[in-house]
Image (spheres, helix red, strand yellow):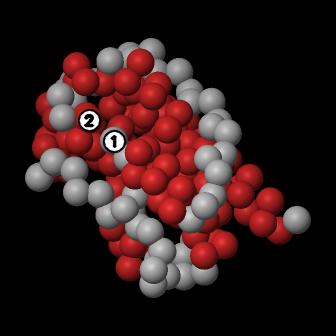
Amino acid sequence: MSLRNALRAGTSDCHADVDALFGRFDLGREADYRAFLSAHARAVPAVEIALENSGIERLIPDWHERRRRDLLVDDLAALNAPLPPSLAAPDMPDDAALLGAVYVLEGSKLGGAMLAKAVGDGLPAAYLSPFGPKGGMKAFMDMLDASGADETAAVEAARAIFALFHKAAAMELEMAAS
């Protein structure tokens, strides 16, 4: 099985769970959209920084074009929303873990492009509409399959990143409900 297929199969339950949780935010409403972005801000910067501290540029030379934390911070600032405290990113001890983590972040870009259509008029949506390198997703998927990385370790790391997003969304939804 290719690494991309192993990641897809090994995280499908996490993916569905996180999608359902984030689906509870109404992106057309400013308050919900702010909470949605805040949830992402609890996870994305921490994961991106952990990836960089672990040397992701060695595996993905165009990493700087793929990062989105600055776009996220800018969108929150445009909404006069403070940057929430980050959750701790899981350890990424090897290349397989790095690739599993990037798999989740890259996949969230695809989902973001779909979600950008639901963002209310006049609300900033740069984070959900990143350009990134042309052909970046295909290049990443091809690189995944050619990597020879340990499937089990990559899936475990991806599941940990999904769990981080789940925790961040649950926190924001709980705060909105109180």
Location of mark 2 (residue):
64
Location of mark 1 (residue):
67
Q: Is residue 108 left or right of residue 88?
A: left
Residue 166, visible in the rendered structure? no
Residue that lies at the very extreme toward the right in this rendered image:
178
What x and y, as percent, mark residue 9? 39, 49
Q: Is residue 59 left or right of residue 99?
A: left
Query: 79 or 7, which is in the foreground?
Result: 79
Vertical position of residue 142 compared to residue 36: above or below: above
Residue depicted at x 73% and y 63%: 173
Secondary structure at badge 1 equals: loop
Query: 51 or 97, which is in the foreground?
Result: 51
Secondary structure at badge 2 equals: helix
What x and y, as percent, mark residue 175? 80, 59
Residue type (three-letter) at the residue carrying disc 2: His
Residue type (three-letter) at the residue carrying disc 1: Arg
Quarter of the image holding residue 111? bottom left
Q: Quadrant of the N terminus?
A: top left
Residue depicted at x 40% and y 58%: 127
Q: Across the whole image, how many numbered discs are drawn on residues?
A: 2
Vertical position of residue 168 compared to residue 94: above or below: below
Badge 1: residue crowd in 10 Å (few <14, some 14–19, many ≥20): some
Quarter of the image holding residue 143? top left
